[in-house]
Image: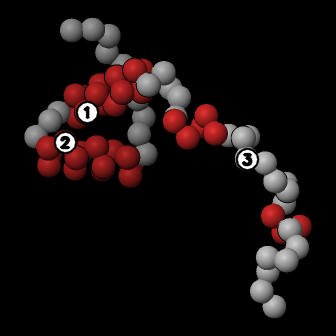
Amino acid sequence: MGLTITIRLSKELAAWLETTAAKSGVSQGKLVREQLEKARTSGGNQAFMRLAGTVRGPKELSTRKGFSRP
C-alpha cells in the first residue's frame, strides 16, 4: 500500500471514529484516508474563509448607536 503513520487521538475523537466505522461498515483507516483526501483536494481552504476581513462597519458593534432597545 503506502506509508504507515501513527497518530494520537483524543478519547472523544477515537470513540467517534470507532462508532462511525462500525455504523458505516467502513474501516477506520479508510475513513481517515477519505477525510485526508478531502482536505487535500480542497487545498486546505475553507470556503467561508474567503470572506474574512471583507465586512465593513464599526470594529465593535457595541459602539453602534440607535440599535439597542431600552
60 versus 64 height, above or below: above
Q: Relative to 60, is 28 on the left or the right?
A: left
Q: Which residue is rendered at x = 32% and y = 10% of the image?
A: 3
**Image disc number at residue 48:** none
Q: In which quarter of the image is the C terminus?
A: bottom right
Residue 34 visible here: yes
Image quarter for residue 29? top left
Label 1 sits on residue: 31
| Residue that extends furthest to the top in the rendered view of this protein | 2
| Residue that extends furthest to the left in the rendered view of this protein | 25
Local secondary structure at mark 1? helix
Q: Relative to 62, is 19 on the left or the right?
A: left
The kind of residue on which mark 1 rests is Leu
Q: Position of residue 44 (x, y in %)?
A: 50, 26
Local secondary structure at mark 2? helix
Label 3 sits on residue: 55
The kind of residue on which mark 2 rests is Ala
Are the two marked residues, 3 and 2, in contact with CB atoms closer than 8 angstroms?
no
Q: Position of residue 48 (x, y in %)?
A: 55, 40
57 versus 10 height, above or below: below
The Cα atoms of the two marked residues, 1 and 3, are separated by 37 Å
Image quarter for residue 58? bottom right
Are the two marked residues, 1 and 2, in contact with CB atoms closer than 8 angstroms?
yes
Lower position in the chain sequence, tag 3 or tag 2? 2
Q: Relative to 14, is 59 on the left or the right?
A: right
Residue 6 visible here: no
